[in-house]
Image: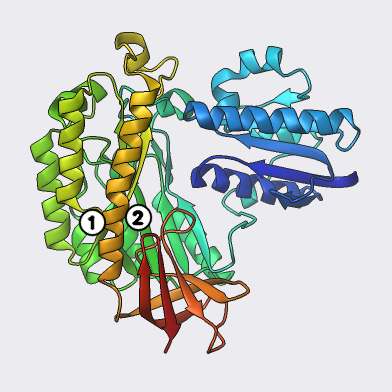
Amino acid sequence: MRKNKIDIISLGCSKNLVDSERLMRQFEAAGYRVAHNPDRVDGETVVVNTCGFIADAQQESIDTILSLGEAKRQGKIRNLLVMGCLSERFRADLIDALPEVDRFYGKFDWKGMLADLGHAYRYDIDRERHLTTPNHYCYLKISEGCNRFCAFCAIPLITGRHTSIPMPDLLDEVRQLVDKGVKEFNVIAQDLSSYGLDLENRMMLPELIDRMANIEGVEWIRLHYAYPTQFPYDILPVMASRDNVCSYLDIALQHISDKVLTNMRRHISRQETLDLLERLRNEVPGIHIRTTLMVGFPGEGEQEYEELLDFVKDARFERMGAFAYSEENGTWAAQNLTDDIPDEVKQDRLHRLMALQEDISLDIQEQKVGQTLRVIIDREEDDYYIGRTQWDSPEVDPEVLISKEKPLAIGEFAQVKITQALPFELLGTAD
C-alpha cells in the first residue's frame, strides 16, 4: 500500500473518463500521486467512477466495488470511495448494500470528496486535466445532461438538465491541450445537437467547431453523440469545408419503425430519419456515419424488427453498434410500458442485426483497398503499428494495422496504402 497515492478506476463512457481526468488533476494539485486504471491497485485510497446507464454497466460497477472491497479486507487498500453515475442514481441503496465502501459521492461532488480528504477544490485549474489517453488525442466534453427524456433512457435522471460549457472556456481548454501535444479532439456530450441552446437560445455547435478548427495545431475534430431531432444542419458546411473536421458523425438513431420511435418518445419519424441521412450524405461527401440501434423495445414485433433489418441493409452505415433493451427504473418506459419481449428473442434479434452489419462493414472496408489514407499512429505492437483514419474513433471503430517495413512515430500521421480489409480492421503499408 503506497501512502499519498490515489488509484482511480474509471468505468463506462468517455464522458466519465473526462470527469476522472479532471479529478486526477485536482488530486495532483493537492499533492497526491495518481494512477488511472492501474494493473495493480496499490494506492492507500481507491476511487471508483461508476457507470449507471444500463444493467450490464451497473453490474460491472458493482462487481468492481466488491472486488476492491475484498482488497480492503485484505489490507491492500485503506480507503474505498465511490462516485459517478451509479452512485448519483442509487446512493441510498448502495450505502446499505455495500458497507465496505467508506463513502459515496454523486457524479459531480468532487469538492466534497476533496474536502473529506482534507483539501480545497482548486477553481483556478477547473478546466485542467490529467490526460489518460495517449498524448496525441483526447476527448472534449462540451456539455452535460440532456433534455430529451427518451422513454428508455435514465441519463436525464442521473445528469439532470442539459448544461453547455461556455465556448470561451472550451476554446481555452483546446489551446491548453494543443500546447501539451494533443492533435485530435473527439468532441463528446450526451446531446451535441443542443449545444448552446441554454446559453444563447441558439444552436452553437457549428460556431464552436468552426472556431476550434481555426486553432493552430488542431489536426482532427470528430463529433460524437448528436441527436437526430432538431439536428443543427449548419454543422454540415463546416464539416465539408474544413480539412481538420473529420467526415464522421456519431448519431444514435435507435430504430426506424414509426411505431417503435413513438413508443421510445424520440420525436422523429421514419421519413424524417431518412431525410436526415440523405442530407448528411449529400452535403458531406464521403461521410462515415456511426449509429446505435436498439432491439427488443416494447412494441417491437416481428414486422417492426424486419423493418429495422431492411433499414440497415439500405442505409449501409459505415459504423454501427446495437444493444438489447433493458428496463431501467424510473424511466418513462418502465412506468408506462410492459417489457414483454423474452430475453432470448432480444438476443436473437441482436445477433442477426450485428451479423448483417458485419457483412456491410466488410463490403465498405474492402472499397478502401488500394487507397492511400492519412492515418494517425496510436501505438506499436509486436508485428504492426496500429493507427486510425479520420473515420475511426478510438476504442470503438476499426483500426489500421501497418506493417513494419518503415519506422513510424507514435502520435504522428502517416500515409498508408491499404492492402487488405477485414470487417473491423484494415491492413496496409506506409508510403
Secondary structure, mark 1, is helix
Q: Residue at x 36, y 78 (%)?
A: 418
Residue 195 seen in render: no
Q: Which residue is mark 1?
A: 235
Res 180 quadrant in image: bottom right
Q: Which mark is residue 223?
A: 2
Picture quarter with the C terminus: bottom left
> How many dots with numbers?
2
Residue 40 seen in render: yes
Give amino acid for label 1: Ile
Give amino acid for label 2: Leu
Secondary structure, mark 2, is strand
Q: Identify whether 179 is placed above or below 168.
A: below
Q: Position of residue 203 (x, y in %)?
A: 25, 46
Q: Residue at x 57, y 27 (%)?
A: 86
**Distance in Å between CA atoms under marks 1 and 2:** 10 Å
Q: Identify whether 322 is placed above or below 150.
A: below
